[in-house]
Image (tube, rainbow, N blue to C red):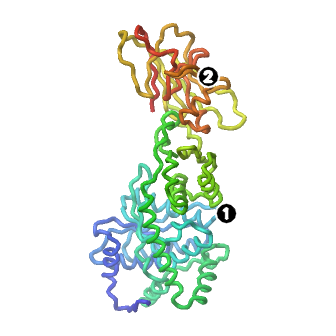
Amino acid sequence: MPRSPHPSDDWSRRWPALARAAGIAGDERLLLALSGGADSVLLLEWLAASAPRWNVRALHVDHGLRGEESEADARFCVERCAALGVPLVVRRAELDAHAPDLEARARAARYALLLAEARASGHTTLLTGHHRDDTLETLLQRWVRGSELAGLRGARAERVLDAPGERPVRLVRPLLGWRREEVRTLLAARALAWREDSSNLDPRFTRTRTRHGLVPMIEELGGPGALDDLAAFADAVESLELELARATAHLAWQPAPHAEVTRAGEERALGGVLARGALAALARPLRRRVLWRLLTESLGVAPSRTVLEKVLLDLDRARCARHSVGCGFTLQLRAKELVLVPPPARAAADAPGEQLLLPFPSQGPARLPAPSVRLTLPGSVLLADGRRITAELTTAAPGSPVPTGACEVELDARDLIGPLTVRWAAPGDRFRALGAPGTKPLGRFLRDRGVPREERARVALVSAGDEILWVAGIEPSERRRIASDSVQRLRLRLIG
């Protein structure tokens, strides 16, 4: 039921009450997303009227899509903030108005600017003016698109926005309990102006058609309480989603063993491995939910329904397969595990003054012969992703301990013929690993060690002539095993 606004309301108490409900402490630094619309203007007025005064700054994002109207929005925000004594920053988002998915791109650009400003200025909490009607419209849009269950929860009152290496920012929506008309009635009662966005009437946008077409139809069919019933449905979905989340939260990608030898730095955390039995133990709806969540977390976008159904069908039928799941990622279904393989790694910039840089071979179908680079003794080779392979000759008393780590090995250097080279796999390569009874094709060796097909071309080899001495980071050659009488040793390291 609408609240009863009155001009004599004490607005100095409005924001502190909202802040307490949202768990916002009085010493938090607040950044308000100020569009000039009624909802964000109401928050601005309440923040400015609060006593004592809160540490707040406003940010207006000018999308530049409506010409003079956009400029007028920015001027309105500047003038109102100046009148209230609230600091304001105006940022411009550069967007192509004719490219597809304008709504989504504008939203992404807006949040990117808001987050960048919050982190740069040290503001810990970001406020937006989303109200109940906004979340109901979002819910309907997702329902029409056939969203997964997690997408039918509606907007959350708060969430934490973080990224690797960045300070997290808390996003809070204090007005989610309010309806659009309640907000406007409060402002009108005090003769306070706000800006109307003409794009809210543009039928090109899904939200416009939802607001002016689908929502009135639901109210007509279901009566005055239809939207409240829809909100109750979203709350019920939220409760169910929380229960499902608790039941499946323990399932997560584990670091892929092969990442150590194919990737460097933060890119080793991309993709991962999941035990197939852990999924098989779940009921199919839970299995679907876990896959959707894990892929969405890794890709940054939700996988398509078609892809999800194909993966689930192969899991149901206990098949091994490969699926392209979007954003350059490949999901490999093995007998005992699922392996999510990320897109080809980004090459690092050349190190200053570095003489030896070995680029990765092409991942395309018509690959040229892989290059090789001479590895001097002592010396090193820099790989394109920033990792480095080093080599040196050492002497040790017979029987001295031998390094056992995968990324540092020592080999018998007696009768070592020809210069050392670092190269990639070539057709016809065979390799006899330490302890193996004989040689086998290099591709089969890498497959047996769990390296996905898509990543095998990224495994570096250290060779002497035609002899592969070390599959870097995986295994040295049996032929160069340290013997009881070995004195001169070749020490090789994979660093980074």
Direction right: furthest residue:
366
Which numbered dot is residue 421? Answer: none
Label 2: few (<14), some or many (≥20) within 10 Å? some
Observer-nearest of 210 and 97: 210
Checking the image for residue 100, the label placed there is 1
Q: Which residue is mark 2?
A: 430
- Judge left or right: residue 147 versus residue 8: right
- Compared with 463, 123 (above or below) is below
Residue in front for this viewpoint, 402 or 189: 402
Q: Give the answer, above or below, for where 11 lies relative to 170.
A: below
Q: Is residue 440 left or right of residue 189?
A: right
Question: Which secondary structure lies at badge 2?
Answer: strand
Q: Secondary structure at mark 1?
A: loop
The amino acid beneath tag 1 is Pro
Which residue is drawn at the image coordinates 60% and 86% (left, top)?
Answer: 216
Does the image show residue 487?
A: no
Residue 258 visible in this rendered orientation of the protein: yes
Labels 1, 2: front one: 2
Q: What residue lies at 54% left-to-right and 63% top-to-bottom? A: 285
Whichever of callouts 1 and 2 sits on the residue coming sooner in the sequence is 1
Residue depicted at 43% across the width and 60% down the height: 161
